Amino acid sequence: MSRGTSRALIIATVASSLLVALAPHADADAVAVPAKLVERARLEIQPAGHAFKQITIENPLGDVRVEGYDGTAIQIETRKQAPNEEALDRLRVSLVPNTDGTVRIKTTADGGRELRPLARGAVRIDLIVRAPRAARIEAVSSSGTLEVINMDGGGDLDSGSGRITVRNVAGQLSTHSVSGPTSLAQVFGSVDAQTLSSDLDLDSIGGQRLVATANHGKIEGRRLRSRDIELTTMDGKIVIEAEASIRGKLVVSSMRGDIDVRLRRNGVLVVRGRGTKVNLGATSRSRSDGWVETQLGHLAAGVTPALVEMRSRHGNVQFAIIE
Amino acid sequence: MTCDDVRPRLTAYLDGELEGDRGTVVRGHLRTCAACRQVATDEATLRDGMRALPTVDPPAAMWASIQAQLAIAEVEESKRPSWRRALSRWTPMLPRFAVGGLAAAAAVTVLWWRSHREPVQISQVVDHPSPEIQASRDIPTATPSSPPFGAPSFDDVTADLAAEPARTTATYAETATELVTLAAEVRPGWTDEQRATFDARVAELRAAVDRATDERPRQRAWRAMIRYLQQAIVRDDVALASGGVH
C-alpha cells in the first residue's frame, strides 16, 4: 500500500468516525423544543491525494441541499430531529470517503428488536453539503426536497415525492421524480428530466440536448436554447418559449395536452403541427398526411433548416414567432 | 397448437406450472405468434405490477371501533344481574351475547391478519463496496408467517425505509402497465411491422427489468420502458420505425 493511499485511508477513517461517533453527542448545538429534539453537527473532509470527483448522497429522511463553492473540501451540515433521545440516537449519517475521489453520504435509522416502534414522520435528517464545484452529484431523496446549485460536474438526481430544484448547474444532468415537481434553471449541458405525476419547470436551459417527459403533469419552459429538444407529456399541457438553433430540432408531443410554442428564430425554420386544432400562423398549409406545415425564411440549396414538430393526439397546437 | 389452445394455458405458463413438453409447446407458439406474445407480455406486466403493490394495513379506525364495541358489551354485561349472566352462559343465542361474540371474532380476525401479514425481517448487507454501511431489508414472503418476537413493524421508520425502494418500483411498474393499456388502444392504427417493432422492443425492455437484481437498477429499467411506451403512443411514426427510438 503506498504512503498516499495509507494517508487517504487514515483520513477517511477518522472523518467517518468523527461524523458517526461525535454527531449524536453534539449536545452543545442541541435545541430542545416541545416534544422534539434537534441536533446539529458539522464536518469538513479534506481531499486526500486528488480532488473529489463524485459525491453520492442518499437521504430518505429529509431535505438535501448541495451548494457548489470554490474550495476543495466537502463541508457537511446535518440537522437531526426526533421526539426523544432514544429516537435521536437511532438516526445515523454514514460517510464513506474513498481513495478514488468519490464520497458517499447516507442517512439511516437504526432498527432493532429492543427498540420501540418509531413513526417515520416523527424523525428527520436534513443535509446541507458544500462541495467543490467540479464534483458530480448523485443524490436520492424521498419526500424531502433535493436542491443542487452552483455545480459544474452535472449529476443524477432521484426523488420520490419531494421537489427537485436545480439552479446554475453545468454538465450532464439527469433528474427523475415520481410525484415531486421538478424545477431546472440555468442548466448548461445535456439534460434528461423525467417525472411521473408532477410538473416540470424549465428555465434557461442550454446545451446539446434536452429531453423531458411528464406522464401526468405539465411542462413549462422559458429561454430554452438547447440544440435538440424533445418534450413529451401524456396528460399535461406543454407551454414553452424557446430559441431555435440553426439546424437544431424541437419536438413537442402530447397525448391529451395542448401545446403552445413561442419561438425566437435564427435562420430557416420548418414548422409542422398535428392536433385537434392547429394554428401555425397565416402562411401554413395542410398536407394530405394530416400535418399542417409552414416554412419561415428562404431555404437555399444545401442548407438544412431547423425543424419544429408539434403533435397532440387529443389537444390543440399553437405556434408563434417571437419578434 | 393454435392460439385458442395456448391462451387458456398462458396463466399457468407464466406461473411456471407447465412442465416438460407442455411448456415447450407454449413457448414455441409464443415465438411465432405476435398476438399471443402480446397477451403474455400484457399479463406478465400486469401481474408484476400487482405483485409489487405494497400490503395494506387495516385502518386504525377499524380497531378502535372493535374495541369500542367490546367495551360497550362489557359495560352492558357488568350491569346485568348475576343470575342472568349465568343464564347467558348457557344461552349463546341471546342477541347481546351475539354482538359481543361477533365483535370478539372480528377482533381475533384482525389480530390474526395483523400477525400473519408482517413480513419476516431479514438482515442483509446492502450492495455496496464498503463494509461500513449495513441496513435491514424486508423480504416479503409469499406464505403468511409470524414475525419474530419484537421485530419492528411497517409502522417503524427502519422497516418503512427498507420497504420504500420496492414501493417506488411498484409505482413505476403501475405506470408502465397503464401505458401498455394505452398502447393497446392506439395499436390498431399501427402497421404489422410497427406492431412487431413495438413487441420486440417492449420484450427487450421487459427483459432488462427482469434482469435487474436490485431496486435502483430495476427502477431505471422501468423508466426506460415508460419512456419508450410514451414515445410509441405519442410519436408512433418515429418510435415504431425500424428499430425504434432507443
Image: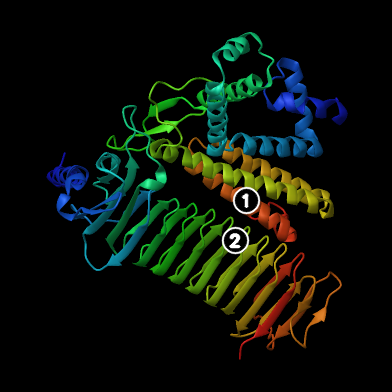
Residue B221 vs residue A33, the one in the foreground: A33
- Left or right: residue A294 versus residue A100 is right
Picture quarter containing residue A232?
bottom right
Residue at 33% across, 30% down: A112
Residue at the top extreme, as displayed: B90
User: Mark 1, residues whose alpha carbon is within 10 Å: few (<14), some, or many (≥20)?
Assistant: many
- Left or right: residue B36 versus residue B44 is right
Q: Is residue B112 visible?
A: no
Q: Is residue B66 visible?
A: yes
Looking at the picture, does residue A207 appear above or below residue A46? below
Locate the N terminus of chain A by quadrant: top left
According to the picture, the residue beneath numbered tag 2 turns out to be A213
Q: Chain of mark 1?
A: B
Query: Residue A269: where, in percent of width, then height?
Result: 66, 81
Q: Chain of mark 2?
A: A
Looking at the picture, does residue A204 appear above or below residue A35? below
Pointer 2 and pointer 1 on the same chain: no
What is the three-letter code of the residue carrying label 1?
Ile
Give the spatial CA distance, label 2 vs label 1.
10 Å
Residue at the bottom extreme, as displayed: A323
Q: Are marks 2 and 1 in contact (CB under 8 Å)?
A: yes
Label of residue B226 in the image: 1
Look at the numbered disc 2 and give the secondary structure of its residue: strand
What is the three-letter code of the residue carrying label 2?
Thr
Query: Residue A209: where, in percent of width, then height?
Result: 53, 67
Residue B127 vs residue A145, the one in the foreground: A145
Query: Residue A306: where, in percent of width, then height?
Result: 63, 77
